[in-house]
Amino acid sequence: MKPLYWIIAAAVLGLAAPAGAEEANDLANMSPEERRAYLEGLSEEERRALQEKRRALCESMSDEERAEARKRMREQRDARREEKRERWESMSEEERAAVREKRRERDKLRDKRRRDRDADRDDEST
């Protein structure tokens, strides 16, 4: 699954979870980088369990609760995008180049992890 899917899943869990859902609150309180690292570190089985938990939670919500959760997610996403835009616009060209390079390195590492994971799956299936 794509990391974005898991970030959204974590956000849904964090926004819609009952007050006692400790794991969901932990995910919701993590920074995007922490959440990404946590979710990428999960085993396939743990990811499936988290996905099932999210699915069950969403199915148990009323239409109004689901609409409210989506509205909050949209508002939070828009606020994050605006913060990023303002931060980007305030950067010098050198700072922007450094951010681009860091992003390229992160993407290379992510792609390598995916290739390794896919290779491990292929080895298990043969």
Image (cartoon, grey):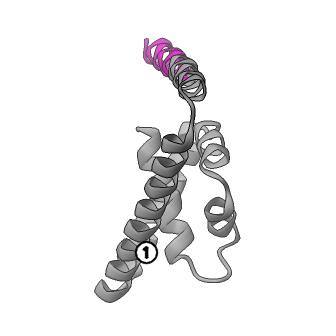
Mark 1 secondary-structure assignment: helix
Residue sitting at x 55%, y 47%: 87
Asked if the magenta segment contains residue 125, the reply would be: yes
Residue 97 is situated, as x and y percent measured from the top left of the image, at 54, 21
Residue sitting at x 60%, y 28%: 95
**In which quarter of the view is residue 72 placed?**
bottom left
* Placement of the N terminus among the 4 image quadrants: top left
- In the displayed structure, 38 sits above or below 16; it is above
- In the displayed structure, 24 sits above or below 89; it is below
Residue 83 is situated, as x and y percent measured from the top left of the image, at 52, 55
Viewer-nearest residue: 3 or 56? 3
Residue occupied by mark 1:
72
In the picture, measured across the screen, residue 23 lies left or right of residue 58, that is right
Viewer-nearest residue: 38 or 124? 38
* Residue that extends furthest to the left in the rendered view of this protein: 63
Asked if the magenta segment contains residue 61, the reply would be: no
* Placement of the C terminus among the 4 image quadrants: top left
Amino acid tagged 1: Arg
Magenta span main SS: helix
Viewer-nearest residue: 54 or 30? 30
In the picture, measured across the screen, residue 49 lies left or right of residue 22, that is left
Residue sitting at x 40%, y 64%: 55
Residue 101 is situated, as x and y percent measured from the top left of the image, at 56, 19
In the picture, measured across the screen, residue 73 lies left or right of residue 67, that is right
**What number of labels is visible?**
1
Q: What stretch is highlighted in magenta?
A: 110-126
